[in-house]
Image: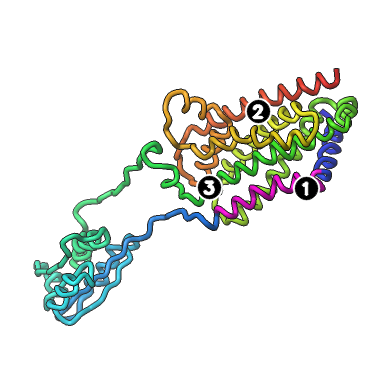
Amino acid sequence: MHFSMVRTIFTKDLRDAIRDARVLVAILVPLGIGIFYSFIFDDGDPTTPTATVVYAAADQTVLPDALRNAIGDVVRVELRQVGSAAEVEAEVRGEDADVGFVVPAGFDAALGAGERPALTVSLPDDPMIGAQYVAGAFEPAVRSMAGQEFPVDIQQSTAVQAVEDESVFERLGLRTYMILVSILFLTAMIAMLVVPVILAEEAEKKTLDALVLVASYADVIVGKALVGVAYIAVSVGIMLALTTLSIAEIPMFIAAIFVTAVTLIGLGLIMAGFFKNANQLNTWSGVFLIPVIGPAFVVGAEFGGVTDAVLLALPSSQAMRLITDAASGESIFGGSWLSFLVIAAWGAAAYAVVSWQLSRRQA
């Protein structure tokens, strides 16, 4: 491979592609879709539970502060003091408050002396989750006031549902998921429309025949592929900037986009060899894009049997799995090594076919 020849092919195609309106459309359409999705969809992040708490105290007490500390940031609490126990009961009964408590006279001093003073806590018949959490926080709050350690070190964990039971939309958020689909769409549009258009036009104008006479197959393939990779890198960067999408694992995301881009460019170059001119390519490119983009919308769904096996064998399905895990920072799908292997296998096969196509042209 001759790097000077690769650089010449790369710079020429990069410059020529910018002037082509079809190239701009192929880039701007998915960019616009991604930005549109970022505005109309919401990730639906769960909001912090809230609770209105009223209390009455016969004298000064630090229990409200101790209660706030025990609750922390788990529940957003509004604490409000009223004049009497009757008012506390009325507020809770009238659903103006979620929790109410009455602190008797000398409560703090009794705790400090090791006594067990009474504390009245009022809850509605059907307390919300915020009220339930506040009610459970009284014991650690009172223990902290009495200078006692909590007798048990409780380690709370959340049982995460498998992706088959909980949709990827719920795990990742609809907005984030649709932007990731748009990124994959953008990658596919450039790889399977922009780069093939360049190759198809050269074949139509017979400049490709002259090119393979002075450059090796590797020079031509690498030069064309680098054009697509450059456009994809810039376009994905613009998409992330405009949508302000945060990626948790950037190295994995970059690796996934790169491997996917290289593979899809190889498939795009094969597709270009089937058409006599760029107009035919534009007409039929949508048909070829459907099996590439379609699987991204159903990643995470469980169809079972042959359908699942087919989806897992497609490079776009595996690419969506990789960028989903990278964006979330969680192993929603896992098996990243297998995803990279499937995509790389498709890429190796694609470039082998492209080399064969070019060798036939030279022959």
* Mark 2–mark 3 distance (CA, rounded to whole Å): 25 Å
Q: Is residue 264 left or right of residue 199?
A: left
Q: Are marks 1 and 3 in contact (CB under 8 Å)?
A: no
Q: Position of residue 23 (x, y in %)?
A: 75, 45
Q: Please tell me the numbered disc located at residue 21.
A: 1
| Range of magenta residues | 17-37
Instruction: Classify mark 1: residues with Cα within 10 Å, few (<14), some (14-19) or many (20+).
Output: few
Query: What amino acid is found at the position of numbered circle 1 in the picture?
Result: Ala
> Considering only vertical position in the picture, is 31 above or below 127?
above
Residue beneath label 3, please? 178
Which mark is first along the chain, 3 or 2? 3
Q: Magenta region, mostly helix, strand or loop?
A: helix
Discs 2, 3 touching: Cβ within 8 Å: no
Tell me what residue is drawn at x 66 percent, y 33 percent.
Answer: 264
Q: Secondary structure at mark 2?
A: helix
Examine the structure image and report whether residue 160 is included in the region drawn in magenta.
no
Q: Which of labels 1 and 2 is toward the front? A: 1
Please rate how many residues cluster around mark 3, counting C-alpha atoms within 10 Å: few if below 14, some from 14 to 19, many from 20. many
